[in-house]
């Protein structure tokens, strides 16, 4: 074997596998996922992205090289999670449509979009994926991402096709809060299986 054509010996203990699950609640202390907290069945996986926006305080100073580390700062982060759902219910529709009024009459849910936002339109979302070579049972490993103050910003989209399941694309953007403007609106939890 070539000297550098190797993989780390812990590779199979440090993989994140499968598509994971999108939930409205999760407790990292117990690692349990309740069925009623699962947003829906997805297709094609899920994509999480946290992209920092930087300022270079030296970019307009003579003789200062671009990207001088002492003069670089993070202004904020753009945090999104996106994918496609293949199941839908009234809760998901209300969330995807952002701001709505919803009524039920004779077993029919009527959802009407609104243009006003309220604090209730911003939700906590969790993406949880299997982590490590021990990912079954009570002590399963996981990678969990908590998306704070998530709001559907990708629009309400339904794609249907002949002899295929309809898909409901989603994109949620995390939001900062005036109450704590320094708090980046996501957190990550990592648990190695078997511990």
Image: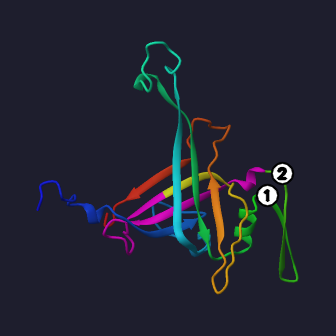
Colour setting? rainbow
49 sits left or right of 123 in the view: left
186 sits left or right of 101 in the view: left
The residue to which callout 2 is attached is 116
Q: Quadrant of residue 153?
A: bottom right
Asked if the residues shown at circle 2 and circle 1 are in contact, with their CB atoms under 8 angstroms apart, the answer is yes
Q: Can residue 145 be found in the magenta stretch?
A: no
Q: Can residue 132 be found in the magenta stretch?
A: yes
Looking at the rendered structure, the secondary structure element under dot 1 is loop
Q: Quadrant of residue 179?
A: top right
Looking at the rendered structure, the secondary structure element under dot 2 is loop
Work out which quarter of the rendered image holds the N terminus and state it: bottom left
Q: Where does the image place residue 52, in percent across and percent down from the top left?
A: 52, 40
Residue at (57%, 48%) from the top-left corner?
Answer: 79
Q: Quadrant of residue 132?
A: bottom left
Residue at (71%, 75%) from the top-left corner?
Answer: 89
Most extreme residue toward the top is 62
How dense is the environment of label 1, judged by Cα within 10 Å: few (below 14), some, or many (20 and up)? many
**Residue range (magenta):** 118-144
Instruction: Pick whichever, 191 or 44, lies toward us.
Output: 44
Q: CA–CA distance between discs 2 and 1?
A: 7 Å
Q: Where does the image place residue 73, in percent across and percent down from the top left?
A: 50, 29
The image shows residue 101, relative to residue 110, as above or below, that is above
The residue to which callout 1 is attached is 99
Task: Name which of mark 2 and mark 1 comes first in the sequence.
Answer: 1
Residue at (20%, 60%) from the top-left corner?
Answer: 9
């Amino acid at each position: 074997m070539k000297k550098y054509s190797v993989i780390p010996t812990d590779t199979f203990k440090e993989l994140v596998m499968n598509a994971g699950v999108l939930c409205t609640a999760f407790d990292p202390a117990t690692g349990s996922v309740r069925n009623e907290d699962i947003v829906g069945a997805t297709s094609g996986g899920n994509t999480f992205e946290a992209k920092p926006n930087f300022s270079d305080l030296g970019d307009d100073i003579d003789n200062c090289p671009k990207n001088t580390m002492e003069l670089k700062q993070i202004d904020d982060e753009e945090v999104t999670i996106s994918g496609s759902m293949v199941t839908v219910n009234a809760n998901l529709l209300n969330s995807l449509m952002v701001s709505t009024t919803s009524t039920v009459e004779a077993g029919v849910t009527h959802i009407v979009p609104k243009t006003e936002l309220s604090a209730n339109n911003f939700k906590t979302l969790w993406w949880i994926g299997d982590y490590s070579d021990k990912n079954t049972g009570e002590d399963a490993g996981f990678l969990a991402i908590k998306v704070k103050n998530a709001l559907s910003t990708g629009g309400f989209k339904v794609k249907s096709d002949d002899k295929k399941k309809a898909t409901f694309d989603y994109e949620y953007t995390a939001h900062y809060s005036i109450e704590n403007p320094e708090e980046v609106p996501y957190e990550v939890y990592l648990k190695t299986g078997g511990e």
